[in-house]
Each structure stands twice: as structure tokens, then as C-alpha cells.
Amino acid sequence: MNRVEHDADGGVKEKAQTRMPHAAIDHFMGETYASQLLAEACAREADFARTEVTSDEEPRALDLDARRSWTLRGGSALLNRFEAQVRSQADGLLAAVGMAPIADLVLECGLFAHRHGDYFRRHIDLFAAERRRHATHDRIATLVYHLHIQPKRFGGGELVLYSLAGAAGALRLPPEHDRLVVFPAYLPHEVEPVSVPGDAFAHARFSINCWLGRPRG
Ligand SMILES: O=C(O)CCC(=O)C(=O)O
Ligand SMILES: [Fe+2]
């Protein structure tokens, strides 16, 4: 046994950090931004469509067994602002999960909503094996920025990180308003089912999901 496994509480955390490297940054964008983005999301409810996923066969298709959530279609100046903030801090965000800076960084960002009954089953964000031919870059790190009305009106929706070794533990992160979570794109994870009493769109679990990637040489 190594030193970490002999440790008390702190050691357990350290072990989880080794198996499921992640970082959480509170107040990442600030309340003014978060409430503006929530207001925009609600005003544009009609621009949200069911999220599609990439499979081995197809670059984009609905697969409601794997993923039930909603994606904002069309651009957003607020999303662009988030992207600019991430770009300016990219090296530090990568370092927070033990990853090296990425030359020619590629960013993919989108705004998502999980409504009543929605979820995203266990998956990795990396396009591996056959799926890889559908993309021109490789995802290196996943960023998830959670936001929702205060106080929170939904239940569930925990982001669960798993170690690569599968059964060796899981880390359940409740979505916290204005918090950014960073983890390597190879780490298996899921969004547990969300329950939104009444299912008002404004009460949904919102998130910006953003990937830091590297163009393929
Ligand atoms: O919303 C989340 O917490 C994570 C979503 C996710 O896993 C993804 O979009 O790939
Ligand atoms: Fe994911």
C-alpha cells in the first residue's frame, strides 16, 4: 500500500483526485453574467432542441437512451464571452487537472438544459475508435459550467465522475450555480436523472459544456 491509502480523510481525497482528477472553481463567471445567461436561456426556450450525440456510425443523431437534454441552437454573445474567458485562462485550467498547455487550442462550447426526466448516461467525451473519424480535433479536457435559478428548483442532476478502473469509485458532484468543473475528457462520467417539479423551463438544470481540444496533425 502506498502512503495515500494509509492516510485518513485527506488521503482518501488525494486518492480520489488521482483516480478522478478534477477541479472546481466557484464564481467562475460571476453573478451578473450567470443571471444574464439564465435570462437569455429562458427568453430563447424555443431555440432549444433535443441534443444529438455522435456515434460510431453517424456524426450526429438522436439517441434518447444515451442522452436526454436540450441544446441551444444559434449563437449567443454571452456564450462567446464565456469562450473568451476560457481561452484566456486555458493554461491554468489545464494545469488544475495536471494537463499541459495546448498549442493551437480548439474550443467547442454549447449551452444545454436538462429538464424533468432528462439525463446523460455514462460516457466519455473523447472521440475514440470509430467515432474519431467524425472530428478534426481531439478533445483533451471537459469543462462544465453549471447555472440555475436560485434557490435550485430541481432535484438530482449530479455530475458523477468515474475512475478509468470502473468499479474503483465514483465522485458525485452536485451542480452548483456559477461553478466551473474541469476534468480530463477521457474520464467516464454521467449526469444523473433530473427531476423538475412542474417542469418550468426556467427551473431546469442549465450548463455550458465546453471542450478544450487539439487539432489533429
Ligand atoms: O452537464 C453536465 O454536468 C455534463 C454534461 C456532459 O457530460 C457532456 O455534455 O458531455
Ligand atoms: Fe460528457
Image: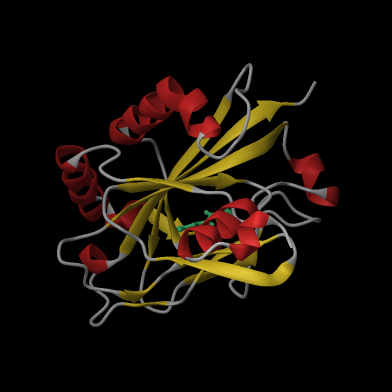
- The answer to whether residue 116 is above or below residue 42 is below
Is 49 left, or right, of 44 in this rendering? Answer: right
Residue 199 at x, y = what percent?
A: 27, 76
Is 64 left, or right, of 168 in this rendering? Answer: left
Q: Quadrant of the N terminus?
A: bottom right
Give the residue displayed 24% in from the left and 44% down from the top. 37
- Residue 108 at least partly seen: yes
Residue 200 at x, y = what percent?
A: 23, 72
Q: Quadrant of the C terminus?
A: top right
Residue 197 at x, y = what percent?
A: 25, 82
Quarter where residue 7 is shown? bottom right
Of residues 38 and 61, the one nearer the viewer is 38
Give the residue displayed 69% in from the left and 70% down from the top. 168
Quarter where residue 104 is shown? top right
- The answer to whether residue 191 is above or below residue 78 is below
- Residue 52 at least partly seen: no
Residue 53 at x, y = what percent?
A: 63, 57
- The answer to whether residue 19 is above or below residue 98 is below
Give the residue displayed 29% in from the left and 45% down from the top. 26
Q: How many marks?
A: 0
Query: Colour scheme of this structure image?
Result: secondary structure
Of residues 106 and 103, the one nearer the viewer is 103
Is 49 left, or right, of 206 in this rendering? Answer: right
**Ligand 2 picture quarter:** bottom right
Of residues 89 and 108, the one nearer the viewer is 89
Give the residue displayed 22% in from the left and 50% down from the top. 38
Q: Residue furthest top?
A: 104
Q: Residue furthest bottom?
A: 197
